[in-house]
Amino acid sequence: MDKLKHYPKSLVIHGDWWNFIQFMSMEERGYLFTCILKLINQNPIEESQLPERCFFAWKMISGLLDISIQKYQEKCERNSVAARKRWQGNLRSPKNGMQMDSNTDTKNNTDTKIDNKTKNDTKNNTETKKTVSFQRPTLDEVKAYCQSINSPIDAEQFYNFYEAKDWMLGKNHIKKWKCCVRTWERNQTKTNKTYISDSQKEAWMKGEI
């Protein structure tokens, strides 16, 4: 995994992960916890060495963690852009004690109006985004998107998994389900193992494997 400029040193653990680990032994849970710590520290994870039940739980949890990390990185980038704008605004401001002529006053007033307009536009765009309600995809939409990007994942398995979770990550609805598709595909191609079938998943949940 490449070192990234913005990477969290902590991640949120969700209570519904218990559904993934309740049938695992304490040793398998230790393997899983070690993988989470490695992910936070951007260390390589040997998925092929994981026990079968631990491997399945890791595939589910790591996909959710990847989405959380992506959100964190996007937030850091937005904060960096805002900080650069504030710095540029400070450079345009006059130093204390300097005498300014009428032309300088006019220029500063114009800059202030532009900055205020930019802030208002940004605020309005943010409010508009907040008012957009979540639109869950249909199975046909998921299949169509997978075909458009030539994704090898099982679109129906992906859809059933997130449909069962009400398309939620923690307490929030998923906003970009297409990102989830790409993350699901990336996790699936990290190992030579095939994905766990529905029958294997059912047996795993019953503690039979």
Image: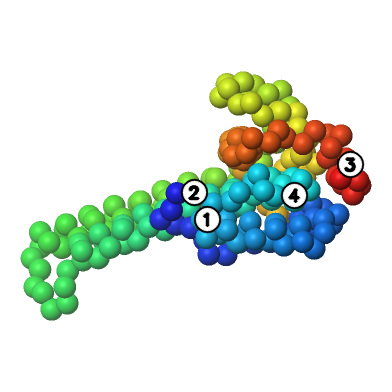
Kind of element beneath mark 4: loop
- Marking on residue 95: none
Residue at mark 2:
1
* Contact (Cβ within 8 Å) of mark 1 with mark 2: yes
Label 3 or label 4, whichever comes before in sequence order: 4
Q: Judge whether residue 1 can be spotted in this image.
A: yes
Amino acid carrying label 1: it is: Asn
The residue carrying pointer 4 sits among few (fewer than 14), some (14 to 19) or many (20 or more) residues within 10 Å by Cα, namely some
- For mark 2, does the 10 Å Cα neighbourhood hold few (<14), some (14 to 19), or many (20 or more) residues? few
Describe the colour scheme in one phrase.
rainbow
Q: CA distance from mark 1 to mark 2?
A: 7 Å
Q: Which label's residue is closer to the chain start, 3 or 2?
A: 2
Left or right: where does residue 83 sit relative to residue 16? Answer: left
Q: Which mark is residue 51?
A: 4
| Residue in view at x 64 percent, y 26 percent | 152
Q: Distance of mark 3 from mark 4, alpha carbons?
A: 15 Å
Q: Position of residue 52 (x, y in %)?
A: 76, 46
- Mark 1 — residue? 43
**Mark with earlier residue (1, 2):** 2
Comes first in the chain, label 3 or label 1: 1
